[in-house]
Image (spheres, rainbow, N blue to C red):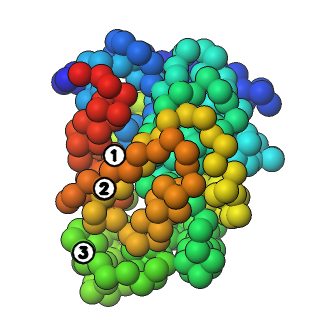
């Protein structure tokens, strides 16, 4: 496993002319890693390093972030699939991984783009339960309002409600604290987090202040998946569905719905990890990397 963050940069031009920039590291068969909402390529660097001894890893900044161009006036899941198409043609990759909304993009791309032979999805939030998604959208609306007002710590407090108010599931560590801390204390915690992050951001990375507003566009992707589950019965790619035992109930509902319809699918629930498992800092990316390698039959 690589021990540092060394990477090269590259870019492609998507169908609508948008530049999609990426980080690249490692050697071997190519795999493209897609980050989730409110994130960027920097979030998946440890996962990339865990894979780089066996793969050439490409980690794009999805549009609207970092190395890539803006979201554009007609942002949609189709724009993300077009970005993926450009990346596949440049890299020759047959493998993709997506966490959270990155998993939505990976699966839709695998449906439309035959170049993808295998896709690994970590807890993609497909729209499969109307009550849960109504709750999710209510939280997202209030989140957007705080962002528009420049109240980023309040937006972060609101986003934490995804753990407690989407499906009302019984919380397990590490999310239990969200349920019991008063909002004013959580706001102070997140204000401190924002300040520390801005002071300690690494070269080439984005600050939380820059990433927080991008979550709005990922909500668009989640809502686009309403009524689309049955479309994936025709997918030709092999798919690995991954989730952690400590994740949110609405994400398990999404995984279960996909597991029932996908024709070439394997489902693995990993004990002891949560929704952030693939990510740097709070996750367990080496565990996710192990499952990816097993699925792709890389020793």
* The N terminus lies in quadrant: top left
The earlier-in-sequence mark between 1 and 2 is 2
Q: CA distance from mark 3 to mark 1?
A: 18 Å
The residue depicted at 34 percent of the width and 65 percent of the height is 247
Q: Which residue is mark 3?
A: 172
Closest to the observer: 16 or 284?
284
Which residue is painted at 38% across and 69% down in the image? 248
**CA neighbours of label 2 inside 10 A, class few (<14), some (14 to 19), many (20+):** some
Judged left or right of residue 10, residue 113 is: right
Query: Which residue is labeled 1 in the image?
Result: 278
Residue 126 percent coordinates (x, y):
57, 60
Q: Marks 2 and 3: CB-CB under 8 Å?
A: no
Image-quadrant location for residue 140: bottom right
**Disc 3 residue crowd, few under 14, some 14–19, many 20+, Cα 10 Å:** some
Horizontally, residue 264 falls left or right of residue 169, namely right
In the picture, which quadrant includes the C terminus? top left
């Amino acid at each position: 496993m690589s021990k540092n963050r060394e990477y090269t940069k590259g870019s492609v031009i998507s169908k609508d002319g948008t530049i999609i920039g990426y980080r690249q590291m490692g050697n071997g068969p190519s795999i493209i890693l897609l980050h989730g909402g409110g994130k960027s390529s920097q979030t998946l660097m440890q996962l990339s390093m865990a894979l780089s001894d066996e793969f050439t890893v490409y980690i794009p900044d999805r549009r609207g972030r970092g190395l890539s161009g803006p979201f554009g006036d007609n942002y949609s899941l189709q724009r993300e699939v077009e970005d993926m198409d450009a990346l596949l043609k440049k890299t020759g990759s047959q493998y993709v991984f997506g966490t959270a909304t990155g998993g939505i993009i990976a699966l839709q791309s695998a449906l439309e783009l035959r170049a993808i032979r295998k896709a690994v999805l970590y807890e993609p939030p497909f729209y499969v339960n109307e009550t849960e998604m109504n709750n999710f959208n209510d939280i997202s609306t209030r989140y957007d309002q705080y962002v528009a007002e420049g109240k980023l710590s309040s937006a972060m407090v609101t986003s934490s409600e995804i753990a407690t108010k989407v499906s009302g599931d019984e919380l397990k560590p590490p999310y239990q604290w969200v349920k019991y801390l008063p909002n004013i204390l959580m706001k102070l915690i997140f204000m401190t987090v924002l300040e520390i992050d801005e002071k300690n951001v690494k070269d080439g990375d984005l600050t939380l202040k820059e990433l927080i507003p991008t979550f709005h566009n990922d909500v668009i992707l989640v809502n686009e998946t309403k009524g689309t589950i049955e479309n994936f019965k025709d997918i030709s790619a092999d798919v690995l569905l991954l989730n952690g035992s400590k994740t949110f109930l609405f994400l398990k509902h999404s995984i279960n719905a996909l597991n029932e319809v996908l024709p070439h699918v394997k489902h693995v629930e990993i004990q002891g990890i949560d929704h952030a498992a693939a990510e740097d800092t709070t996750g367990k990316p080496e565990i996710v990397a192990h499952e990816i390698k097993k699925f792709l039959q890389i020793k």
